[in-house]
Image (cartoon, rainbow, N blue to C red):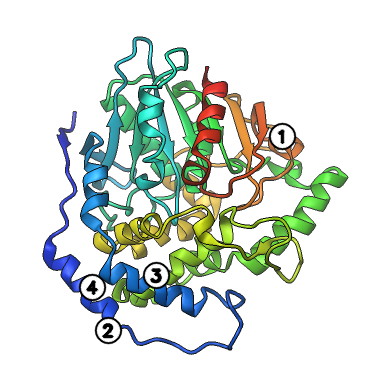
Amino acid sequence: MPEIRLFQIAVPQTEIDDLRLRLRDTRWLSEVPGSGWLHGIDLGFAQELAAYWADEFDWRAVESMLNGFPQFRTSLTAWTGESLGIHFIHRRSPRPGARPLMIQHGWPSSVYDFHKIIDELAEPSDPSAPAFHVIAPSLPGYGWSDIPSRIGYGPAAIADMWVELMSNLGYDQFLYHGGDWGAAVGGQLALRRPERIARIHLTASALAPGGSDARPQNDEERRFFAEEQEPYIRDDAAHRGIHGTKFQTMAFHLEDSPVGLMAWIVDKWWLLADILREGEGLRSAAGKMPRGGDLYRRFTKDQLLATVAIYWFTRTQSSAMRIYHEAMRPPAEVEAEVGARVRLRDGERSAVPTGFVKLTRGTPLPPRSWCERACNVVHWAEFPEGGHFPAMEVPDLLLADLRRFFA
């Protein structure tokens, strides 16, 4: 069994100093006066946040907070035969009967997303609440996990690696919560290794119904794909097209310019988080996805910059984009590589008990009827607030729903 080693984050001071110099030497662009966020991140907002990053942001405070969690690294072997060092938080609960729970998000996030809920999941302040041994891994090519040197690390391959990780930790069966790419990995866990997953909780669709089942079959589904999904892809998900195709060309400037990286990441938080008050904001061309609001309604400057800084110091923006490229590869090609199915057949669905949460903003979640053709949906919740980053935006709502579902 691979060695599991304690790990602590320690960014060299020279890298922090270099970051500050780069921020202060930024060459700023022009913008259409008064355009705000219409064409991307607002120039004034970016300049203010960059100045704060250069002069006031305390990376050592973030580092210390994350180092307060038990962190580890171990080696896992992918289908490629490559051995990758994987970083993860493993917060064991002192409570008798605590069950293992893996939690996972995607881009533009990191394990930092979960810092508000990990301790409360492991050691609830309410003695009657369920407790969990919490495992929060960094995806391959994210954070302090190794960057793969080969292609082939899509959701299916990662799901297999997480089964290996949980086996090495001594967990034969576990619970799972995922959003964004974490939901896609969760779907592959349910499809490929259902005997290992007791229950799965998701904030995004994980598996598409197979064959003809994937086509909209009622008015609610037709309306969703025409009025929500298609406009979202067209107007508000430009990053998916770039990350999924020629991401390396974009990565040159993201890896070299901290302001460029900050702008790319923070723009997505502004778009996907629940930051609007009633009556606020512009709208996309289709009129469905609201655009606008105040990011500081949900996040502090330090919270936004903590996420950006993790990508900067670990130099993982380029490798983090690769999973989009992997997800666009033909399923038959991926199935040949990993040696098992990665999609459902016509009329087939996952048997793993699954719970979904519909968020107020973010990647649109299809109607329950569509999800039920792919998954054994036993729980469906709709949050009154909170967008794509619920562990950061509405941690109390997420905690309550996780407890209800996994009780």
Task: Specify the quadrant that holds the N terminus.
Answer: top left
Q: Amino acid at mark 3?
A: Leu
Q: Amino acid at mark 4?
A: Arg
Task: Answer with mark 4 or mark 3, whichever residue precedes in sequence.
Answer: 4
- According to the picture, the residue beneath numbered tag 4 turns out to be 20
Can you say whether 398 is above or below 225 in the image? above
Decide which of 139, 391 is in the foreground and name it: 391
- According to the picture, the residue beneath numbered tag 2 turns out to be 25
Lateral position of residue 339 relative to residue 91, left or right: right
Decide which of 106, 77 is in the foreground and name it: 106
Say which mark, if any, is on residue 269.
none
Identify the element where label 3 is drawn: helix
Between marks 4 and 1, how big is the CA–CA gap? 51 Å
Q: Residue at x 62, y 37 (%)?
A: 357
Can you say whether 242 is above or below 393 in the image? below
Q: Residue at x 42, y 56 (%)?
A: 300
Mark 2 and mark 1 in contact? Answer it, CB < 8 Å: no
Between marks 2 and 1, how big is the CA–CA gap? 53 Å
Bin the neighbour count of mark 3 within 10 Å (Cα to Cα): few under 14, some 14-19, many 20 and up: many
